[in-house]
Image: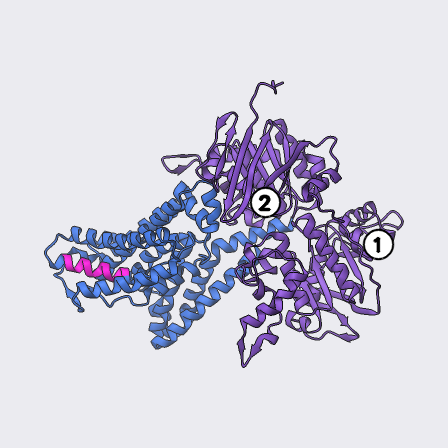
Chain colours: A blue, B purple
Amino acid sequence: MSRQRRTGVGRALNLFGPFIGLLLVIALFALIPEVQGRFLRAANFKSVATQSVIVALGALGMTLIIISGGIDLSAASNIALASVITAYAINAGAAPILAILLGVLTGGLVGLVNGGLVTRLRLVPFIVTMGMMGIARGAAKWIAGNQKIDAPMTWVNELMSKSPRPPWLLLAPGIWIVILFAVAMAVLLKYTVFGRHIFAVGSNEATARLCGLRTNQIKILVYAISGLFCGLSGVMEFSRLTVGDPTVAVGLELDIIAAVVIGGGSLSGGEGSILGTMVGVLIMSFLRNGCTMMGWPNYIQEIIIGAIIIVAVALDRLRHRTA
Amino acid sequence: MRDVAAAPPVLRMAGVSKSFGATRALDDVSFVLGHGQVHALIGENGAGKSTMMKILSGAISPDAGRMEIDGRPYAPSGPADGLRCGVSMIYQELNLAPHLTVEENIMLGREAHTAGWLDRKAMMRKVRESLELVRHPEISPEVPVGRLSVGAKQLVEIARALTNRSRIVVMDEPTSSLTQEDSQRLFEIIRGLKGQDVSIIYISHFLEEIQRVADSYTVLRDGRSVGSGTMEGTSLEDIIQLMVGQKFIQLFPKVEHTAGEPVLSLNSLKGTRMASPVSLTLSKGEILGVAGLVGSGRTEMLRTLFGLDEVEGGAVVVSGAELTGRRPWTRIRRGLGLLSEDRQGEGLAPALTVADNMTLSDLAPYRRHGLLSPSRQRRAVAGLIGTLKIKAKGPDQKVGDLSGGNQQKVALARLLHQKASVLLLDEPTRGIDVVSKSQIYELIGGLAREGKAVLFVSSYLPELLGICDRIVVFHRGVLVESRPTSAWDAAGLMAAATVGRTSREKPIEQRNTV
């Protein structure tokens, strides 16, 4: 009987653990008198959400990859490459929608190559994507001629605008895009055969193969989907900056991975959830936001976020022991 | 009733051969499996059983020979294809995804769906149907498999085979890590499967068990089929003789040894994972057996003693001095050596070489100016490889490539190499072949003769009775009884282990733990 109760508590912790973290972070800054007033404003929450879009899109794909037992270190470089391609296309006179499509597909292509190398050459994802991290970053700089690409203003730049048009949208279109895809991915993971197979591959690949799953095909697809999300994230990056900057988002892959891990993803595969990841993204955004308001220097933020990652994973282990 | 004479057998393998490089793993083997039969496949490790089963499952293809299922040619292109043709394997290393639920595991690869959308209701229905047959209190469709006990996991695999409508189920050492209770349940399920016209190939080292469940048997030796027939009218001696061939083996070789002064005593040792404190004394040159059911606290006692689990109270005295350190490395320095029950996961580093594994716990002799000398390491272990009759290509072979029996000898060799004077052996003969077993018994006897003290934990009663000087029994975490081996018999041990008391004693108070 006690066993069952304990698993109940464990399950509750699993579901709400990341939320508790998020509430703690928000409560922390809400209680500090110096920032309370500014921090708790709707406008501030809106700006935090907008700032989260780029990491959130990357983290959606990364969640799939991590559940499948893989990792993608090239995500941030891929984002930069996609932003450069989008800017390049708009600059060359392409219709905005075509430019967006090009950016997204570039990301997808990089992901496809990642997946192909991981499965065909049987290389460790860490190594393949670390190589791709350099290749994509280099390609971005090459295409951009080692400088920023200025592009004329189009409606693409409104995707990340805090005062959207039409005003009834309330939030930046980018936020709505994140919400839409988050729901889509959560449904994919829970209610489709493909989603279930992603978990199976990450939990025990040998078993998955034995049960007749096409593990290679599943992995390639997962990397390709993740690449598409990086591409979309790159488009948002371009929208935010209004230029295509090949040096943008350096090190962002670690934020993306951290978000997934804080949200309950396990680097050994088989575990993770979209909801958790999204909460993980918000935890980090709110921390950055609060620290900036406090006037704390950048290095303090880095230390705090580093500590949070370790604490989150430690809590995760504890959670598993009680479960 | 089916007309047995007319219907082709479920499975026929004819003239199957397979070589790996220069070694002939299977040589012209033929095999027939009848409808609703349990057919035992017997042989020492390395006799060709696993090669044969890999060919059957489709994991590897034979060099020669052919297979038929129900009279139709069968040539699987891979394990998934074999599964489709109705051949299910239930391996020793369990093939389940720990994060997925029971339902998800059972339906893996065969999910009911409409255009990619899962049809959970349909799947639940199917899963409940197959779980009906394997009934187990721990198993319900929504539980993640990682939370189940080993026995329950095995039943989930069987349920998977059932939902797959498998005609042939291969069970490889199914009871090696099961409790007595779960084994009984398995045997009942096997009977149920036979009733549903499912045929079973049953691989086990426990010959008594084979005698109980199997209808017929085939013995493999050195890649050849050396005998087969019905179980009825065949004695265990006959089978053992077939297994070992001309070689005459004595399963429990007698090695004379005498106990000396006490070398190890536990004074109310209590660990965080032990249910209650344990006191016992072990002398030089003594082999002390520890009996009890799986989970009765034997392993926890060993691990606490060795410093792998946390100590909560009590004292351990080795050679007259109390142990102070709490970590395994301090215990090793004081002469303790532990052989883990989990050979693959903990006992050995499968990717490292024989030499590295043997010397891992004491590398000091091979170090000069902070650098290791692999050549001296190799020279040092060459002797051990000979003494323990380890079948390996040499000190540089990876341990993971050796057979189970030889792996276990490497693990034992490490304790000898580190010159342990008190050996804590946890299930040292689990899952290994008869010849290796006998060699290990002889080795342990020899160690006792040299004056080493051995604590021997085992679930296999005949070996405890065969080689120990004294046997203690654990029941639900409590050491309930200690007697010289001559005062025990198998029934008495089993009674003490299962109900915590023996006929000669008053019942001990019933504990409500677990």
Point out the stretch of residues depicted in magenta. A78-89
Q: Depth check: give the residue in front, B117 or B480.
A: B480
The chain to which mark 2 is attached is B
Chain ID, mark 1? B
Circle 2 residues within 10 Å: few <14, some 14–19, many ≥20: many
Q: Nearest the camera: A140 or B414?
A: B414
Residue positioned 38% across, 56% down in the render: A123
Is residue A84 inside the magenta stretch? Answer: yes
Residue type beneath disc 2? Lys
> Which disc is residue B7 wearing?
none
On the image, which quarter does residue B189 sit in? top right
Distance between the alpha carbons at the discs numbered 1 and 2: 35 Å
Q: Quadrant of residue A214?
A: top left
Give how far across and how far down residue B286 sits, in percent. 80, 63
Left or right of B195, for residue B234: right
The residue that appears at 72% across and 41% down in the rendered structure is B241
Q: In the image, what residue type sits under mark 1? A: Thr
Which residue position is annotated with label 2?
B153
Q: Nearer the viewer, residue B73 or B456?
A: B73
Residue at 88% from the left image edge and 51% from the top image edge: B505
- Quadrant showing the N terminus of chain B: top right
| Residue B94 locus on image (x, y percent) | 56, 46
Q: Is B129 drawn above or below residue B20 in the view shown?
A: above
Answer whether residue A48 is magenta in the image. Answer: no
Is A45 displayed left or right of B396 in the figure?
left
On residue B485, the disc is 1
Evaluate whether residue A171 shows in this view.
Answer: no
